[in-house]
Amino acid sequence: MDGIVDVEGPLHVVALGYGKVEDPFHVWVTETNVELFEHLRELATGASWKEKRQIAVLVAEPPGGRANPDAVAAVESVRGAVLSLAVELGPAVRLNVVVAGQVTDAAQVLRYLASPDADYVTGSTFDLRETA
């Protein structure tokens, strides 16, 4: 994984970056989730009903896309991890996943998640990748 990038604002965006296609499976899946989980827990610490936190995990489609089984597993594992954490953290933290073919494709969904219209949206995945 190339790393995690944070963008703060009304909606805290955590953008995941993936490594090369040649990287082993454990880098794509295990290390990504461990690092992401630790980071999301840090962001959510101290969240209360009065201090609702809004976090979106933005996942650009990894190299190789749906033709790469490791890429598919990486995206699905992030979705599962975020859903699990959203349930655990409860209503004080809104935590969602946006999967996009290109990071720029996600702007409209991120605006929606930052708006009052999405106040009770949590544990959801917005998959913006094109289907074949």
Image (cartoon, rainbow, N blue to C red):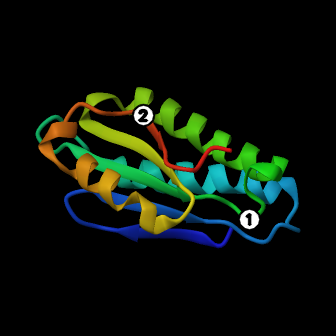
- Amino acid at circle 2: Ser
Q: Quadrant of the N terminus?
A: bottom right
Horizontal relation, residue 86 to residue 31: left or right: left
Circle 1: element type: loop
Image x and y of residue 75, in percent: 65, 47
Using the image, determine if residue 80 lies above or below residue 132.
above
Image x and y of residue 32, in percent: 66, 56
| Mark in front: 1 vs 2 | 1
Image x and y of residue 87, in percent: 42, 26
Q: Nearer the viewer, residue 84 or 75?
A: 75
Using the image, determine if residue 1 lies above or below residue 65.
below
Residue labelled with disc 2? 124
Horizontal relation, residue 13 to residue 115: left or right: right
- Amino acid at circle 1: Pro
Mark 1 neighbour class, 10 Å CA radius: few under 14, some 14 to 19, many 20 or more: some
Horizontal relation, residue 61 to residue 11: left or right: right
Q: Residue at x 60, y 57 (%)?
A: 35
Circle 2: element type: loop
Residue labelled with disc 1? 63
Distance between the Cα atoms at labels 1 and 2? 23 Å
Specify which label sits upstream in the sequence, 1 or 2. 1
Horizontal relation, residue 31 to residue 101: left or right: right
Q: Residue at x 24, y 48 (%)?
A: 112
Q: Residue at x 81, y 51 (%)?
A: 67
Q: Residue at x 25, y 55 (%)?
A: 111
